[in-house]
Amino acid sequence: MDMSRARELAGLYRAELMENVVPYWERYSPDREHGGFFTCLDREWQLYDSGKWAWFQGRAVWMFSRLYRTAGQKPQWLEAAQRGIEFIDRHLFDPQGRMYSAVTRDGTPRWAPKGLFSECFTVYGLAQYARAAQDAGALDGAQRLFSRVLEMAEQPELDGPRLPGQPPFIIHAVPMILLNLAQEMREATGSNEYDKVADEMLYRILRLHCHPEHSAVFENVLADGEVVDDPDGRVLNPGHAMESAWFILREAQYRNDNELRDRAVQMIEWSLEAGWDSEYGGMLYFVDARDRPNRYLQWDMKLWWVHLETLYALLLGHSMTGRADLLTWFERVHEWTWARFPDRQHGGWYGYLLRDGEVCLTLKGSAWKGFYHVPRALLLIAELLEELAR
């Protein structure tokens, strides 16, 4: 990338983060009465549901901690993260040590524990907060909870018993997030003991979910990697594959492993081929690997996080390989994304567009959209562009 273009884009992404995203979430997301974070905010940042989803409590802790550590040590950021951790400790664990999926504003249990992602993102937040606040207690809590998460990941009936006709799928999201958590814990502790976890998750992603014969990253496969020819077995999620790819690129940087780097770039190429909408532009949400009817009604929507993860994966891939085609794709996705997602009237980014790019939902947050994907991607992209500009 030309240095002047890198400087121009770095300024754009950094300004968007600090002027159009962070100020709004900083003002409207923290609950200053009960602690924790709201996410259900409409276009004008008014609360439409005061419930608190557990996975976004940990994600917001991570985001405020990361900002404090690397974007200016503003006391309100560290305070918000601390109050988030206090809310998690007081209200989000059930008597068996599992995390509720959601609670009410004051912390009353609302949704029962499900899966392991609430625990995963709590580890994520604790580890980053420990670095930001130099808090040994938070780091110890992250280590203990991560050990518990690894145990949970090996429990096939975590969400309940499997019915006789249900294929015994393993899902891409689990090794993907555990790879990222291993990286986060390694950075927080300075210990290479997490390399073994990363090794296992790389194997599961690259050997079980990635299928070169199909040029695809399958979300659901059998335990030996076999692809099942039904709607669940054929489903591709290009945004997930992009996010997984940049986690692997980061691991390739750490290991100085060009073969691993190239495998991750291959995932990016497959995801562009599957996900880019040749008719309207933008990245599709879900794709059927055989172009059969898709079981997800929202398959053709254009979502914020898919485009942001795609942008960072492309830019990181370009920075590590020098490949001009990845930069060309970055510019293409950048243009499409920035023309549609930012809300210049009320601040923040929209999350949900129709296939043609028109806004479908004007909300700024929900049970699935909070203070995470937009600011994380803007920050990571700005940092990488600043590095390229130097």
Image (tube, rainbow, N blue to C red):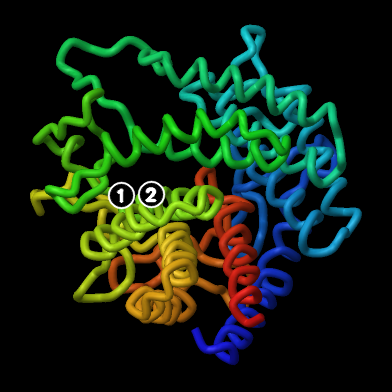
Location of residue 68 by image quarter: bottom right
The relative height of residue 238 versus residue 104 in the rendered view (above or below) is below
Residue closer to the observer: 369 or 209? 209
Tell me what residue is drawn at x 17 percent, y 48 percent. 294
Tell me what residue is drawn at x 66 percent, y 8 percent. 95
Q: In the rendering, at what x and y percent does residue 102 appear?
A: 59, 29
Q: In the rendering, at what x and y percent does residue 171 appear?
A: 33, 32
Amino acid bearing label 1: Asn
Left or right? Give the position of 320 relative to 384: left
Tell me what residue is drawn at x 53 percent, y 59 percent. 363
The relative height of residue 192 versus residue 288 in the rendered view (above or below) is above
Q: In the rendering, at what x and y percent does residue 368 appear?
A: 50, 45
CA–CA distance between discs 1 and 2? 5 Å
* CB under 8 Å between discs 1 and 2: yes
The residue indicated by pointer 2 is 240
Amino acid bearing label 2: His
Q: In the rendering, at what x and y percent does residue 285 appear?
A: 31, 55
Q: Give the quadrant of the C terminus.
A: bottom right
Residue reaching furthest to the right:
75
The relative height of residue 161 versus residue 346 in the rendered view (above or below) is above
Location of residue 374 by image quarter: bottom right
Residue closer to the observer: 313 or 344? 313
Alpha-carbon neighbours of circle 2 within 10 Å: few (<14), some, or many (≥20)? many
- Residue 361 visible in rendering: no
Left or right? Give the position of 202 relative to 316: left
Name the element at disc 1. loop
Q: Which mark is residue 237?
A: 1
